[in-house]
Amino acid sequence: MSSWREMFGEEPHSDFDFNKPMWPREVAYDPSKHASNNAHRFLLAREEHAQLICSDGDLYTLGPNNVWRLVTDPEVVAEIRKTDTEIRLDITKLGLMVREVKIARSVNARPFEWINAREDAPSPNDLILANNGIFNIATGELMDLTPDYFATGVPGWAFDSSADCPLWLAKLGEWLDKSYHPTLQEWFGYTLTPDTSFEKIAAMIGASRGGKGTIKGVLEQLTGAHHRASIMLNDLAGDFGLQTMIDKRLMVIPVASDTELSKRSMALERIKSISGNDAVSVNRKNKTMLNQVHIPAKITLLANKHPKFIDESGALAIRELLFVFDRSFAGKEDMTLKARLNDELPGIANWAIEGLKRLRRNRRFTIGERGLIAQEQLTDSQSPALRFTKECLVVTGDKDDVLPLSLAFDAYREWTDRESLSMRERRNRSDFKEDMIAALRARGVKHATNQIRWHDPHLSKPGNGERVRARFVGLKLKRKFHPELLSL
Protein backbone atom coordinates (compact mmCIF):
# COMPACT_ATOMS: atom_id res chain seq x y z
CA MET A 1 0.00 0.00 0.00
CA SER A 2 1.24 3.52 -0.79
CA SER A 3 2.48 5.66 2.08
CA TRP A 4 0.66 8.76 3.29
CA ARG A 5 3.40 10.96 1.80
CA GLU A 6 3.15 9.20 -1.56
CA MET A 7 -0.59 9.67 -1.59
CA PHE A 8 -1.03 13.17 -0.19
CA GLY A 9 2.43 14.75 -0.23
CA GLU A 10 2.62 15.34 3.52
CA GLU A 11 2.62 13.53 6.83
CA PRO A 12 -0.60 13.41 8.87
CA HIS A 13 -0.91 16.10 11.52
CA SER A 14 -0.87 15.03 15.14
CA ASP A 15 -4.39 16.37 15.50
CA PHE A 16 -5.67 14.32 12.51
CA ASP A 17 -9.37 13.55 12.88
CA PHE A 18 -9.97 9.92 12.01
CA ASN A 19 -13.74 10.52 12.09
CA LYS A 20 -13.57 12.72 8.99
CA PRO A 21 -14.38 11.06 5.67
CA MET A 22 -11.26 9.79 3.90
CA TRP A 23 -12.39 11.28 0.59
CA PRO A 24 -12.16 13.80 -0.89
CA ARG A 25 -8.99 15.09 0.78
CA GLU A 26 -6.17 17.38 -0.33
CA VAL A 27 -3.85 16.01 -3.02
CA ALA A 28 -0.47 17.61 -3.71
CA TYR A 29 -0.82 18.58 -7.37
CA ASP A 30 2.05 20.25 -9.19
CA PRO A 31 0.80 22.82 -11.73
CA SER A 32 4.18 22.75 -13.46
CA LYS A 33 3.64 19.10 -14.36
CA HIS A 34 1.56 17.92 -17.31
CA ALA A 35 -2.03 16.79 -16.78
CA SER A 36 -1.18 13.08 -16.96
CA ASN A 37 1.13 13.34 -13.96
CA ASN A 38 -1.52 15.07 -11.87
CA ALA A 39 -4.22 12.64 -13.06
CA HIS A 40 -2.19 9.72 -11.71
CA ARG A 41 -1.69 11.54 -8.39
CA PHE A 42 -5.48 11.90 -8.22
CA LEU A 43 -6.02 8.22 -9.05
CA LEU A 44 -3.47 7.03 -6.51
CA ALA A 45 -5.23 8.96 -3.78
CA ARG A 46 -8.78 8.25 -4.89
CA GLU A 47 -8.49 4.52 -5.30
CA GLU A 48 -7.83 4.12 -1.62
CA HIS A 49 -11.45 5.24 -1.46
CA ALA A 50 -13.04 3.60 -4.54
CA GLN A 51 -11.98 2.19 -7.87
CA LEU A 52 -12.69 3.83 -11.21
CA ILE A 53 -13.10 2.18 -14.60
CA CYS A 54 -13.84 3.58 -18.04
CA SER A 55 -16.07 1.66 -20.45
CA ASP A 56 -16.94 3.07 -23.89
CA GLY A 57 -15.71 6.48 -22.79
CA ASP A 58 -17.90 6.57 -19.65
CA LEU A 59 -16.48 6.52 -16.13
CA TYR A 60 -17.89 4.30 -13.38
CA THR A 61 -17.06 4.32 -9.68
CA LEU A 62 -17.36 1.28 -7.42
CA GLY A 63 -19.90 1.58 -4.63
CA PRO A 64 -19.76 -0.12 -1.25
CA ASN A 65 -22.13 -2.84 -2.50
CA ASN A 66 -19.76 -3.70 -5.39
CA VAL A 67 -22.07 -2.01 -7.89
CA TRP A 68 -20.53 0.24 -10.53
CA ARG A 69 -22.17 3.68 -10.68
CA LEU A 70 -21.92 5.92 -13.74
CA VAL A 71 -20.20 9.25 -13.04
CA THR A 72 -20.24 12.14 -15.49
CA ASP A 73 -17.21 14.13 -16.54
CA PRO A 74 -18.44 17.24 -14.64
CA GLU A 75 -18.76 15.11 -11.49
CA VAL A 76 -15.15 13.97 -11.80
CA VAL A 77 -13.99 17.54 -12.47
CA ALA A 78 -15.83 18.70 -9.35
CA GLU A 79 -14.29 15.84 -7.35
CA ILE A 80 -10.77 16.77 -8.49
CA ARG A 81 -11.43 20.39 -7.59
CA LYS A 82 -12.38 19.36 -4.04
CA THR A 83 -8.96 17.74 -3.70
CA ASP A 84 -7.27 20.92 -4.99
CA THR A 85 -8.13 23.31 -2.17
CA GLU A 86 -5.38 25.75 -3.12
CA ILE A 87 -6.70 25.96 -6.71
CA ARG A 88 -3.42 25.02 -8.34
CA LEU A 89 -5.11 23.60 -11.45
CA ASP A 90 -6.93 25.64 -14.08
CA ILE A 91 -10.01 24.44 -15.94
CA THR A 92 -7.98 23.26 -18.95
CA LYS A 93 -5.81 21.01 -16.80
CA LEU A 94 -8.89 19.63 -15.08
CA GLY A 95 -10.39 18.61 -18.41
CA LEU A 96 -7.16 17.04 -19.57
CA MET A 97 -6.88 15.15 -16.29
CA VAL A 98 -10.30 13.58 -16.84
CA ARG A 99 -9.21 12.46 -20.30
CA GLU A 100 -6.08 10.86 -18.83
CA VAL A 101 -8.14 9.15 -16.08
CA LYS A 102 -10.28 7.56 -18.80
CA ILE A 103 -7.23 6.31 -20.68
CA ALA A 104 -5.58 4.97 -17.52
CA ARG A 105 -8.67 3.13 -16.33
CA SER A 106 -10.06 1.91 -19.66
CA VAL A 107 -11.56 -1.62 -19.76
CA ASN A 108 -12.99 -3.65 -22.64
CA ALA A 109 -15.98 -4.92 -20.66
CA ARG A 110 -19.54 -3.65 -20.88
CA PRO A 111 -22.31 -4.11 -18.28
CA PHE A 112 -23.18 -7.74 -17.50
CA GLU A 113 -19.68 -8.89 -18.47
CA TRP A 114 -16.62 -9.83 -16.45
CA ILE A 115 -14.11 -7.00 -16.06
CA ASN A 116 -11.41 -9.37 -14.85
CA ALA A 117 -12.58 -12.90 -15.53
CA ARG A 118 -10.99 -15.91 -13.84
CA GLU A 119 -10.36 -18.95 -15.99
CA ASP A 120 -13.22 -20.73 -14.25
CA ALA A 121 -15.59 -17.75 -14.32
CA PRO A 122 -19.17 -18.71 -15.25
CA SER A 123 -20.74 -17.46 -18.46
CA PRO A 124 -22.39 -14.04 -17.95
CA ASN A 125 -25.46 -15.44 -19.75
CA ASP A 126 -25.99 -17.82 -16.81
CA LEU A 127 -26.00 -15.10 -14.15
CA ILE A 128 -29.06 -13.51 -12.51
CA LEU A 129 -28.61 -10.50 -10.26
CA ALA A 130 -30.41 -10.43 -6.90
CA ASN A 131 -30.11 -8.09 -3.95
CA ASN A 132 -28.07 -10.65 -2.00
CA GLY A 133 -25.75 -11.88 -4.75
CA ILE A 134 -25.56 -13.45 -8.20
CA PHE A 135 -27.48 -16.65 -8.89
CA ASN A 136 -25.81 -19.00 -11.35
CA ILE A 137 -28.58 -20.89 -13.13
CA ALA A 138 -26.10 -23.42 -14.53
CA THR A 139 -24.93 -24.56 -11.09
CA GLY A 140 -27.69 -23.42 -8.74
CA GLU A 141 -25.09 -21.49 -6.72
CA LEU A 142 -25.66 -18.08 -5.14
CA MET A 143 -22.36 -16.19 -5.46
CA ASP A 144 -21.21 -12.95 -3.91
CA LEU A 145 -21.25 -9.89 -6.13
CA THR A 146 -17.65 -8.87 -6.73
CA PRO A 147 -16.03 -5.84 -8.41
CA ASP A 148 -14.88 -8.14 -11.22
CA TYR A 149 -18.47 -8.40 -12.48
CA PHE A 150 -19.76 -5.28 -14.24
CA ALA A 151 -23.09 -4.72 -12.47
CA THR A 152 -24.57 -1.22 -12.61
CA GLY A 153 -27.32 -2.02 -10.11
CA VAL A 154 -29.15 -4.79 -8.27
CA PRO A 155 -32.90 -5.38 -7.88
CA GLY A 156 -34.69 -5.04 -4.58
CA TRP A 157 -35.59 -8.71 -4.08
CA ALA A 158 -33.33 -11.28 -2.44
CA PHE A 159 -32.87 -14.79 -3.77
CA ASP A 160 -34.53 -17.44 -1.59
CA SER A 161 -34.73 -20.94 -3.03
CA SER A 162 -37.63 -21.86 -0.71
CA ALA A 163 -39.91 -18.94 -1.64
CA ASP A 164 -43.19 -19.52 -3.52
CA CYS A 165 -45.83 -17.28 -5.12
CA PRO A 166 -49.42 -18.56 -4.69
CA LEU A 167 -51.04 -15.14 -5.15
CA TRP A 168 -49.14 -14.53 -8.40
CA LEU A 169 -50.20 -17.88 -9.85
CA ALA A 170 -53.82 -17.29 -8.86
CA LYS A 171 -53.90 -13.84 -10.51
CA LEU A 172 -52.35 -15.19 -13.71
CA GLY A 173 -55.26 -17.60 -13.91
CA GLU A 174 -57.65 -14.64 -13.83
CA TRP A 175 -55.78 -12.50 -16.36
CA LEU A 176 -54.57 -14.93 -19.01
CA ASP A 177 -55.72 -18.15 -20.63
CA LYS A 178 -53.69 -20.98 -19.13
CA SER A 179 -52.14 -21.83 -22.52
CA TYR A 180 -50.13 -18.59 -22.22
CA HIS A 181 -48.70 -19.36 -18.75
CA PRO A 182 -45.66 -21.48 -19.79
CA THR A 183 -44.70 -18.87 -22.40
CA LEU A 184 -44.92 -16.05 -19.89
CA GLN A 185 -42.92 -18.02 -17.32
CA GLU A 186 -40.15 -18.59 -19.85
CA TRP A 187 -40.21 -14.92 -20.91
CA PHE A 188 -39.78 -13.77 -17.31
CA GLY A 189 -36.81 -16.11 -16.83
CA TYR A 190 -35.26 -15.08 -20.14
CA THR A 191 -35.47 -11.41 -19.14
CA LEU A 192 -33.52 -12.02 -15.92
CA THR A 193 -30.31 -12.80 -17.83
CA PRO A 194 -28.36 -10.81 -20.46
CA ASP A 195 -28.74 -13.73 -22.87
CA THR A 196 -30.40 -12.67 -26.15
CA SER A 197 -29.84 -15.83 -28.17
CA PHE A 198 -33.52 -16.82 -28.46
CA GLU A 199 -34.32 -13.67 -30.50
CA LYS A 200 -37.82 -12.96 -29.22
CA ILE A 201 -39.91 -10.02 -28.05
CA ALA A 202 -43.13 -10.03 -26.04
CA ALA A 203 -46.33 -8.18 -26.88
CA MET A 204 -49.08 -7.86 -24.29
CA ILE A 205 -52.22 -6.78 -26.13
CA GLY A 206 -55.76 -6.33 -24.95
CA ALA A 207 -58.29 -4.69 -22.72
CA SER A 208 -57.44 -1.92 -20.30
CA ARG A 209 -57.37 -2.96 -16.65
CA GLY A 210 -56.91 -6.53 -17.81
CA GLY A 211 -53.74 -7.38 -15.91
CA LYS A 212 -51.03 -6.57 -18.45
CA GLY A 213 -49.92 -3.43 -16.57
CA THR A 214 -49.55 -5.39 -13.32
CA ILE A 215 -47.58 -8.14 -15.08
CA LYS A 216 -45.34 -5.47 -16.59
CA GLY A 217 -44.81 -3.94 -13.15
CA VAL A 218 -43.77 -7.26 -11.62
CA LEU A 219 -41.35 -7.89 -14.49
CA GLU A 220 -39.84 -4.45 -13.91
CA GLN A 221 -39.41 -5.16 -10.19
CA LEU A 222 -37.69 -8.47 -10.91
CA THR A 223 -35.33 -6.77 -13.37
CA GLY A 224 -34.53 -3.86 -11.06
CA ALA A 225 -34.68 -0.10 -11.52
CA HIS A 226 -31.16 0.23 -12.93
CA HIS A 227 -31.62 -2.40 -15.61
CA ARG A 228 -34.98 -1.46 -17.09
CA ALA A 229 -36.03 1.35 -19.39
CA SER A 230 -39.37 2.67 -20.59
CA ILE A 231 -39.41 4.23 -24.04
CA MET A 232 -41.98 5.32 -26.61
CA LEU A 233 -41.76 4.11 -30.20
CA ASN A 234 -41.11 7.64 -31.45
CA ASP A 235 -38.19 8.00 -29.02
CA LEU A 236 -36.81 4.59 -29.95
CA ALA A 237 -36.72 5.74 -33.58
CA GLY A 238 -34.94 8.99 -32.67
CA ASP A 239 -31.25 9.76 -33.22
CA PHE A 240 -30.32 8.87 -29.63
CA GLY A 241 -32.95 6.23 -28.98
CA LEU A 242 -30.46 3.53 -27.98
CA GLN A 243 -27.95 5.52 -25.93
CA THR A 244 -29.41 4.54 -22.54
CA MET A 245 -29.86 0.84 -23.40
CA ILE A 246 -26.29 -0.43 -22.96
CA ASP A 247 -26.91 -1.70 -19.40
CA LYS A 248 -30.60 -2.61 -19.69
CA ARG A 249 -32.07 -6.11 -19.61
CA LEU A 250 -35.66 -4.94 -20.10
CA MET A 251 -36.99 -2.38 -22.57
CA VAL A 252 -40.68 -1.64 -22.02
CA ILE A 253 -42.71 0.17 -24.68
CA PRO A 254 -45.69 0.98 -22.45
CA VAL A 255 -48.09 2.56 -24.95
CA ALA A 256 -47.22 0.95 -28.26
CA SER A 257 -49.45 3.12 -30.44
CA ASP A 258 -48.51 3.99 -33.99
CA THR A 259 -45.42 6.10 -34.46
CA GLU A 260 -45.18 9.12 -36.70
CA LEU A 261 -45.06 8.05 -40.34
CA SER A 262 -41.51 9.35 -40.74
CA LYS A 263 -40.26 7.25 -37.81
CA ARG A 264 -42.28 4.07 -38.22
CA SER A 265 -39.74 2.25 -40.38
CA MET A 266 -36.82 3.16 -38.10
CA ALA A 267 -38.70 1.99 -34.98
CA LEU A 268 -39.49 -1.31 -36.71
CA GLU A 269 -35.91 -1.82 -37.89
CA ARG A 270 -34.51 -1.14 -34.43
CA ILE A 271 -36.93 -3.56 -32.81
CA LYS A 272 -35.96 -6.22 -35.36
CA SER A 273 -32.23 -5.56 -34.91
CA ILE A 274 -32.32 -5.67 -31.11
CA SER A 275 -34.55 -8.74 -30.95
CA GLY A 276 -32.50 -10.40 -33.69
CA ASN A 277 -29.33 -10.14 -31.61
CA ASP A 278 -27.70 -7.97 -34.27
CA ALA A 279 -24.77 -5.68 -33.55
CA VAL A 280 -25.98 -2.10 -33.91
CA SER A 281 -24.51 1.40 -33.92
CA VAL A 282 -25.43 3.52 -30.90
CA ASN A 283 -25.44 7.26 -31.44
CA ARG A 284 -24.87 9.17 -28.21
CA LYS A 285 -25.48 12.87 -27.65
CA ASN A 286 -22.18 14.75 -27.27
CA LYS A 287 -20.29 11.45 -27.13
CA THR A 288 -18.51 9.16 -29.55
CA MET A 289 -20.79 6.81 -31.47
CA LEU A 290 -20.44 3.16 -30.49
CA ASN A 291 -20.23 0.49 -33.17
CA GLN A 292 -20.96 -3.22 -33.03
CA VAL A 293 -22.99 -3.10 -29.83
CA HIS A 294 -25.28 -5.96 -28.78
CA ILE A 295 -28.14 -4.47 -26.78
CA PRO A 296 -28.96 -6.94 -23.95
CA ALA A 297 -32.49 -5.61 -23.39
CA LYS A 298 -35.55 -7.77 -24.02
CA ILE A 299 -38.41 -5.78 -25.57
CA THR A 300 -41.91 -5.93 -24.08
CA LEU A 301 -44.71 -4.06 -25.89
CA LEU A 302 -47.99 -3.10 -24.24
CA ALA A 303 -51.02 -1.83 -26.15
CA ASN A 304 -54.78 -2.05 -26.34
CA LYS A 305 -54.29 -3.04 -30.00
CA HIS A 306 -51.13 -4.02 -31.81
CA PRO A 307 -49.30 -1.18 -33.61
CA LYS A 308 -49.75 -1.29 -37.38
CA PHE A 309 -46.31 -2.32 -38.52
CA ILE A 310 -45.89 -3.36 -42.15
CA ASP A 311 -43.36 -6.18 -42.30
CA GLU A 312 -43.75 -8.30 -45.41
CA SER A 313 -40.80 -10.51 -44.45
CA GLY A 314 -42.75 -11.75 -41.43
CA ALA A 315 -39.56 -11.51 -39.32
CA LEU A 316 -41.17 -9.47 -36.56
CA ALA A 317 -44.30 -11.60 -36.25
CA ILE A 318 -42.18 -14.77 -36.06
CA ARG A 319 -40.19 -13.26 -33.19
CA GLU A 320 -43.19 -12.05 -31.19
CA LEU A 321 -44.57 -13.89 -28.21
CA LEU A 322 -48.12 -12.58 -28.22
CA PHE A 323 -50.23 -12.49 -25.03
CA VAL A 324 -53.87 -11.52 -25.52
CA PHE A 325 -55.80 -10.11 -22.54
CA ASP A 326 -59.50 -10.39 -23.29
CA ARG A 327 -60.97 -9.53 -19.88
CA SER A 328 -61.21 -6.17 -18.14
CA PHE A 329 -61.40 -5.64 -14.39
CA ALA A 330 -62.21 -1.94 -14.60
CA GLY A 331 -64.01 -0.88 -11.43
CA LYS A 332 -62.77 -3.98 -9.58
CA GLU A 333 -59.17 -2.90 -9.01
CA ASP A 334 -57.40 -4.28 -5.92
CA MET A 335 -55.36 -1.36 -4.55
CA THR A 336 -53.37 -3.67 -2.27
CA LEU A 337 -52.33 -6.09 -5.01
CA LYS A 338 -49.06 -4.41 -5.96
CA ALA A 339 -47.72 -4.49 -2.39
CA ARG A 340 -48.78 -8.10 -1.89
CA LEU A 341 -47.13 -9.19 -5.14
CA ASN A 342 -43.95 -7.36 -4.16
CA ASP A 343 -43.81 -9.58 -1.09
CA GLU A 344 -43.82 -12.58 -3.41
CA LEU A 345 -40.98 -11.39 -5.65
CA PRO A 346 -38.48 -14.04 -4.41
CA GLY A 347 -41.06 -16.72 -5.18
CA ILE A 348 -41.88 -15.20 -8.58
CA ALA A 349 -38.15 -15.19 -9.31
CA ASN A 350 -38.04 -18.94 -8.55
CA TRP A 351 -41.03 -19.43 -10.88
CA ALA A 352 -39.22 -17.47 -13.61
CA ILE A 353 -35.99 -19.44 -13.10
CA GLU A 354 -37.90 -22.69 -13.62
CA GLY A 355 -39.27 -21.24 -16.85
CA LEU A 356 -35.76 -20.34 -18.00
CA LYS A 357 -34.54 -23.86 -17.26
CA ARG A 358 -37.36 -25.32 -19.37
CA LEU A 359 -36.64 -22.84 -22.18
CA ARG A 360 -32.99 -23.89 -22.27
CA ARG A 361 -33.83 -27.58 -22.14
CA ASN A 362 -36.28 -27.31 -25.03
CA ARG A 363 -34.21 -24.71 -26.90
CA ARG A 364 -37.38 -22.88 -27.87
CA PHE A 365 -40.30 -21.11 -26.26
CA THR A 366 -43.39 -23.09 -25.36
CA ILE A 367 -46.26 -21.55 -27.34
CA GLY A 368 -49.78 -22.77 -26.59
CA GLU A 369 -52.81 -23.00 -28.83
CA ARG A 370 -54.01 -19.46 -28.17
CA GLY A 371 -50.54 -18.08 -28.79
CA LEU A 372 -50.20 -19.87 -32.13
CA ILE A 373 -53.54 -18.52 -33.32
CA ALA A 374 -52.64 -15.01 -32.22
CA GLN A 375 -49.27 -15.22 -33.97
CA GLU A 376 -50.85 -16.32 -37.26
CA GLN A 377 -53.33 -13.44 -37.08
CA LEU A 378 -50.48 -11.03 -36.35
CA THR A 379 -48.47 -12.27 -39.34
CA ASP A 380 -51.44 -11.62 -41.62
CA SER A 381 -52.09 -8.18 -40.15
CA GLN A 382 -48.49 -7.08 -40.72
CA SER A 383 -48.37 -8.34 -44.32
CA PRO A 384 -51.02 -7.12 -46.78
CA ALA A 385 -49.18 -9.10 -49.47
CA LEU A 386 -49.62 -12.29 -47.46
CA ARG A 387 -53.32 -11.60 -46.86
CA PHE A 388 -53.79 -10.96 -50.58
CA THR A 389 -51.98 -14.20 -51.41
CA LYS A 390 -54.06 -16.29 -49.02
CA GLU A 391 -57.31 -14.96 -50.43
CA CYS A 392 -56.62 -14.59 -54.14
CA LEU A 393 -53.68 -16.80 -55.14
CA VAL A 394 -52.44 -20.37 -54.95
CA VAL A 395 -48.82 -20.92 -53.94
CA THR A 396 -47.41 -24.00 -55.66
CA GLY A 397 -43.66 -23.31 -55.84
CA ASP A 398 -43.77 -25.09 -59.24
CA LYS A 399 -41.58 -23.55 -61.97
CA ASP A 400 -44.30 -24.27 -64.56
CA ASP A 401 -46.84 -22.08 -62.74
CA VAL A 402 -46.39 -18.50 -63.95
CA LEU A 403 -48.28 -15.32 -63.05
CA PRO A 404 -47.40 -12.07 -64.88
CA LEU A 405 -46.63 -9.18 -62.55
CA SER A 406 -49.09 -6.94 -64.41
CA LEU A 407 -51.99 -9.39 -63.90
CA ALA A 408 -51.07 -9.99 -60.24
CA PHE A 409 -50.91 -6.23 -59.61
CA ASP A 410 -54.30 -5.64 -61.28
CA ALA A 411 -55.82 -8.33 -59.04
CA TYR A 412 -54.07 -6.75 -56.03
CA ARG A 413 -55.56 -3.31 -56.76
CA GLU A 414 -59.05 -4.83 -57.00
CA TRP A 415 -58.43 -6.57 -53.67
CA THR A 416 -57.23 -3.38 -51.92
CA ASP A 417 -60.44 -1.63 -52.99
CA ARG A 418 -62.60 -4.46 -51.62
CA GLU A 419 -60.59 -4.57 -48.37
CA SER A 420 -60.63 -0.76 -47.98
CA LEU A 421 -56.90 -0.67 -47.26
CA SER A 422 -55.51 2.63 -46.07
CA MET A 423 -53.21 4.66 -48.31
CA ARG A 424 -50.29 3.64 -46.07
CA GLU A 425 -51.02 -0.04 -46.70
CA ARG A 426 -51.49 0.24 -50.48
CA ARG A 427 -48.34 -0.36 -52.51
CA ASN A 428 -47.19 0.76 -55.95
CA ARG A 429 -46.23 -1.84 -58.54
CA SER A 430 -42.53 -1.91 -57.65
CA ASP A 431 -43.12 -2.15 -53.88
CA PHE A 432 -45.84 -4.76 -54.45
CA LYS A 433 -43.33 -6.97 -56.29
CA GLU A 434 -40.76 -6.64 -53.48
CA ASP A 435 -43.41 -7.30 -50.82
CA MET A 436 -44.61 -10.46 -52.55
CA ILE A 437 -41.10 -11.88 -52.83
CA ALA A 438 -40.33 -11.00 -49.19
CA ALA A 439 -43.54 -12.71 -48.03
CA LEU A 440 -43.31 -15.80 -50.27
CA ARG A 441 -39.62 -16.45 -50.97
CA ALA A 442 -39.45 -19.12 -48.28
CA ARG A 443 -42.31 -20.97 -50.02
CA GLY A 444 -40.48 -21.23 -53.33
CA VAL A 445 -41.90 -18.20 -55.15
CA LYS A 446 -39.45 -16.33 -57.39
CA HIS A 447 -39.45 -13.37 -59.77
CA ALA A 448 -38.14 -13.67 -63.33
CA THR A 449 -37.67 -11.13 -66.15
CA ASN A 450 -36.57 -13.08 -69.25
CA GLN A 451 -39.17 -13.02 -72.03
CA ILE A 452 -41.52 -15.99 -72.46
CA ARG A 453 -44.84 -16.71 -74.15
CA TRP A 454 -47.71 -17.26 -71.72
CA HIS A 455 -51.32 -18.41 -72.05
CA ASP A 456 -53.77 -17.18 -69.41
CA PRO A 457 -55.35 -20.43 -68.12
CA HIS A 458 -58.57 -18.59 -67.23
CA LEU A 459 -59.15 -16.97 -70.65
CA SER A 460 -59.50 -18.80 -73.98
CA LYS A 461 -57.50 -16.80 -76.51
CA PRO A 462 -56.13 -18.19 -79.79
CA GLY A 463 -52.55 -17.90 -80.88
CA ASN A 464 -49.16 -18.60 -79.39
CA GLY A 465 -49.82 -16.65 -76.19
CA GLU A 466 -48.73 -13.20 -75.13
CA ARG A 467 -45.13 -12.16 -74.54
CA VAL A 468 -44.38 -11.44 -70.87
CA ARG A 469 -41.23 -10.61 -69.00
CA ALA A 470 -41.83 -9.61 -65.38
CA ARG A 471 -43.59 -12.49 -63.72
CA PHE A 472 -43.88 -14.55 -60.54
CA VAL A 473 -42.86 -18.19 -60.73
CA GLY A 474 -44.63 -20.67 -58.44
CA LEU A 475 -47.92 -18.75 -58.21
CA LYS A 476 -51.36 -19.11 -59.73
CA LEU A 477 -54.32 -16.70 -59.67
CA LYS A 478 -57.64 -18.08 -58.45
CA ARG A 479 -60.21 -17.83 -61.23
CA LYS A 480 -62.82 -15.94 -59.22
CA PHE A 481 -60.34 -13.11 -58.55
CA HIS A 482 -59.25 -12.62 -62.16
CA PRO A 483 -59.81 -8.89 -62.91
CA GLU A 484 -61.41 -9.62 -66.30
CA LEU A 485 -63.84 -12.14 -64.80
CA LEU A 486 -64.93 -10.25 -61.68
CA SER A 487 -67.85 -8.55 -63.43
CA LEU A 488 -69.14 -11.73 -65.10
Image: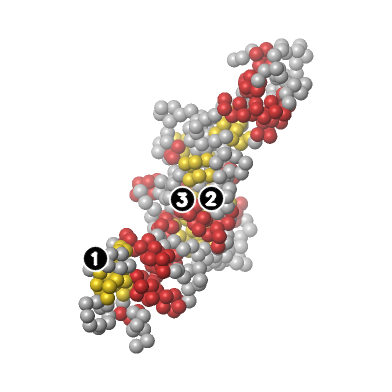
Secondary structure at badge 1 equals loop
- Residue type at mark 2? Met
Q: Along the horizontal axis of the image, is 464 left or right of 33?
A: left
Q: Along the horizontal axis of the image, is 265 left or right of 333?
A: left
- Above or below: residue 213 compared with residue 9: below
- Residue type at mark 3? Ser
Q: Report how far apart the C-alphas of labels 3 and 2 lie in the structure.
A: 14 Å
Q: Residue at x 76, y 11 (%)?
A: 14
Q: Is residue 475 visible?
A: no
| Residue highlighted by disc 2 | 251
| Residue highlighted by disc 1 | 399
Which of discs 2 and 1 lies nearer the camera? The answer is 1
Label 3: few (<14), some (14–19) or many (≥20) C-alpha neighbours in 10 Å: some
Label 1: few (<14), some (14–19) or many (≥20) C-alpha neighbours in 10 Å: few
- Residue type at mark 1? Lys
**Which of the marked residues, 3 or 2, is nearer the chain's N terminus?**
2
When asked about the image quadrant of residue 29, the answer is top right
Q: Is residue 121 visible?
A: yes
- Above or below: residue 372 compared with residue 414: above
| Residue highlighted by disc 3 | 273
- Above or below: residue 105 compared with residue 319: above
- Contact (Cβ within 8 Å) of mark 3 with mark 1: no
Q: Give percent across and percent down for residue 167.
A: 53, 54
Q: Residue at x 70, y 28 (%)?
A: 92
Q: Give percent across and percent down for residue 484.
A: 34, 82
